[in-house]
Image (cartoon, grey):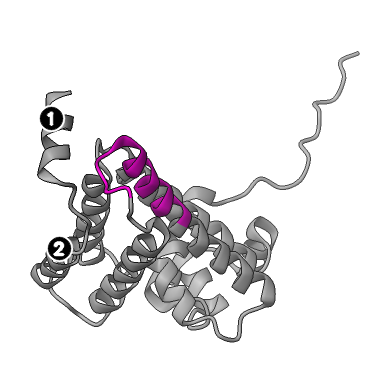
Amino acid sequence: MTSPPARTRGRPRAFDRDKALAAAVEVFWRKGFEGTSISDLTEAMGINPPSLYAAFGDKEQLFLEAAESYGRKRGSECPYCDEPTARGAVEKLLTYMARELSASDQPRGCMMVNAAATSANASARLQRVLAEKRAANRDHMRARIKQGIADGDVPADTDAGALADFYVTIMSGLSMQARDGASRKSLLATVERAMLVFPKRSKRKSAELAAG
């Protein structure tokens, strides 16, 4: 006597989770956290509220997962720390952002900056996570500048923390300008001006590094 076929556990999802998450990213990116409703999300994701809650949890949990997805994609597209000099790394990141934030095929501005500006009434947990992500960005920038100091392509007396704070502030400003409709040309001009602040190594040191 043959055994009955094994029963599958649970009901299989009738939607592509990755595509649904990508749709949620775009909604949060366009409207911000507080400006996005559950109905906005379910309409864009092509699912009903019970499916959203079952697959992603509540709106806040979905946003946090969307933020992780957004961050991974942008990080893989612009591995700026791989540049041979700290100045080159910072300029690469800012130039990438100026182009990315003004792209015509996606929402303008940075999803994380937009979220920070539209999450005043969010939970303490979400506020903490957003603050931690901002701090991580500053830490990465500061670490790359410190590496430049150690490598000799940034003057030894440079305040890496202050310089990192300056460029992180520029990045936030680029996002807000893009959100308000600034042109790519204008954003790139801002990057060019911001790079004038980057400390220059002495001509003698530059010659030594080139010779080495």
* SS category of the residue bearing label 1: helix
Identity of the residue furthest to the bottom in this view = 121
Q: Is the residue 100 above or below the residue 126 in the image?
A: above
In which quadrant of the rendered image does the N terminus lie?
top right
- Nearer-the-camera pick, 116 or 8: 116
For marks 2 and 1, give the CA distance. 21 Å
Image-based side of 199 in relation to 66, left or right: left
**In the image, 4: left or right of 156?**
right
User: If you read the primary sequence from the N terminus, does the residue marked by circle 2 or circle 1 appear first?
Assistant: 2
Q: Residues within 10 Å of mark 1 (few under 14, many from 20)?
A: few
Position of residue 86 relative to residue 102, above or below, is: above
**Residue beneath disc 1:** 210
Q: Position of residue 62 (x, y in %)?
A: 59, 63
Q: Amino acid at mark 2?
A: Leu
The kind of residue tagged 1 is Ala
First to last magenta residue range:
139-156
Q: Which of 66/95 is in front?
A: 95
Q: Residue 36 appears at what percent x and percent y? A: 49, 79
Instruction: Reply yes or no: does residue 146 show up in magenta.
Output: yes
Mark 2 element type = loop
Query: Residue 12 sits in which quadrant?
Result: top right
Q: Is residue 113 visible?
A: yes
The residue at the point 19 percent across, 59 percent down is 99
Tell me the quarter of the picture where residue 52 sits.
bottom right
Q: Is residue 38 magenta?
A: no
Quickly name the residue at label 2: 196
Left or right relative to 98: residue 210: left
Q: Position of residue 200 (x, y in %)?
A: 18, 52
Q: How many marks?
A: 2
Measuring 80% from the left and 34% from the top, which residue is drawn there? 7
Sort mark 2 into few (<14), some (14-19) or many (20+) by Cα contacts within 10 Å.
Answer: few
